[in-house]
Amino acid sequence: MIVTRVYIVVLASCLAAWQDAAGRPAHCEADPAHVTLAWEAEDFSAIYPYLRTVDCEGASGGRCLSGPEPRSMRDPTRAVYRVDVPRSGTYYLWARLQAGSGDWGTWETVRVNGRKVGYLDYPRFLPPRPVTTATGEPVQFFRGENGRWVSPWCWTPCLTIRTFREVPKDARLAPVPLDLAKGMHVLEVGPPGGSQIESWDQLDMLLLTTDADRDLLLKTEAVPCTGERVVFPQTEPSDLLVVKAESASSLELPCEPRAARGASGGSALGWRDEDWGGRATYVFNLPSAGTYYLWARMSPMSWVDLISIPSGGWVAEAGGSEATLSYSPSSWGWTWVRPWMILEEEKADRGKRVPRGLELPAGRARLALRPGKPRAGMRMLVDQLALTKDRYYVPARTGWEVLEVRGPQPIPGG
């Protein structure tokens, strides 16, 4: 199994027992009282569309995680890290960031095992105010000088506030405590969607430590020491089901297969010219009941649809519930998208969108797709559908590529 390169931070003096052929430390002794794990952000298990790795001067490995040009993000985008925690305990999360070019950049929502735990933000353009670290040391935030923005790489903690602009007076900044058991955990980091992104903060490294006194706030140096591996790439779920969208059990016109460049097999599910309506119904024999998470590989039907206001694309129906498959316009091309929902307890929070599941029974299960509310443009082609109970799975690891058809296929005429 391919495993990412990760870093173990030396909390006491590092005893270089030996070196490998490249001259790098092969083992370092860390303080046995604490566990500290750090890794490069581009060593993700999987990423959603719109995030990408780019060359970054000053990044620990010369590359970092960033996004495309500024845009309005309708849906969230995330980097997913499957982290093997070696010891149970209370952990604290830090990130090494560099600000984007605008006054307002991305602030990242952090989720652990699906639960929102806090936010990461680059400290920029704050008015003078007394703020201290968790140990009581005064903090001097980075700010622009003479109209020019200065943004060195620096470490920032995972906080309960969305942005440093919300830091209360006389605050002490300490990372959110995370109680983690030994074993695999899923960490998700990324913009929550539903807001305009003026510029993307760039993410270089992430660090988990059990040392509550470790204070990296606004320190600029990258973590130096290479050690054991703890972040693993995703594997395909055993229950993953992938079908061609036009291989539905039944189709109602004007919904029909259409030739489509870039689609698997050269065709996809769409509409007749200017017509709107119809339905695609899929009937499967599923091996087990449960909450399934749907992904769809989608693309606008034309350039006119690309630049139009999103209209909701397609709506999935199953078990008496509905889920909208929307498409956040980016560049022309195919993108895997999923339906989202807002948790009641997070309605007042902009980091509020979570994957929406569909309840499907064992045996004969029915799923239908119909076009969303008609509006000018944004008629969407659908190439493939993927279903799995794994809510953290991202198709093809980067959210763009075609998948191999697998699992139970739609029953013709079902």
Image (cartoon, rainbow, N blue to C red):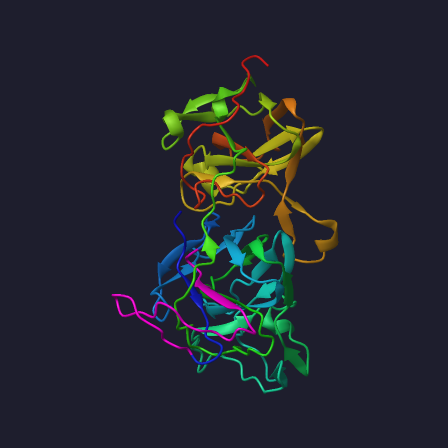
Q: Principal SS element in the magenta part?
A: loop
Q: Where is residue 109 in the image (x, y as percent from the top left)?
A: 58, 59
Q: Which residue is drawn at 54% across and 61% down?
A: 86
Q: Does the magenta stretch include residue 29?
A: yes
**Between residues 106 and 244, which one lies in front from this camera angle?**
244
Q: Which residue lies furthest to the left in this view?
A: 21
The C terminus sits in image quarter: top right
Q: Which contiguous range is marked in magenta?
A: 14-43
281 within the magenta span: no
Q: Position of residue 75 (x, y in %)?
A: 56, 48
Q: Residue at x 41, y 56 (%)?
A: 4
Q: Where is residue 313 in the image (x, y as percent from the top left)?
A: 55, 35
| Up/down of 87 relative to 272, above or below | below
Residue at left offset 62%, top offset 75%: 174
**As drawn, is 15 to the left or to the right of 317?**
left
Q: Report the front residue among 127 and 115.
A: 115
Q: In this view, does 183 lie above or below 406?
A: below
Residue 271 shows in the view? no
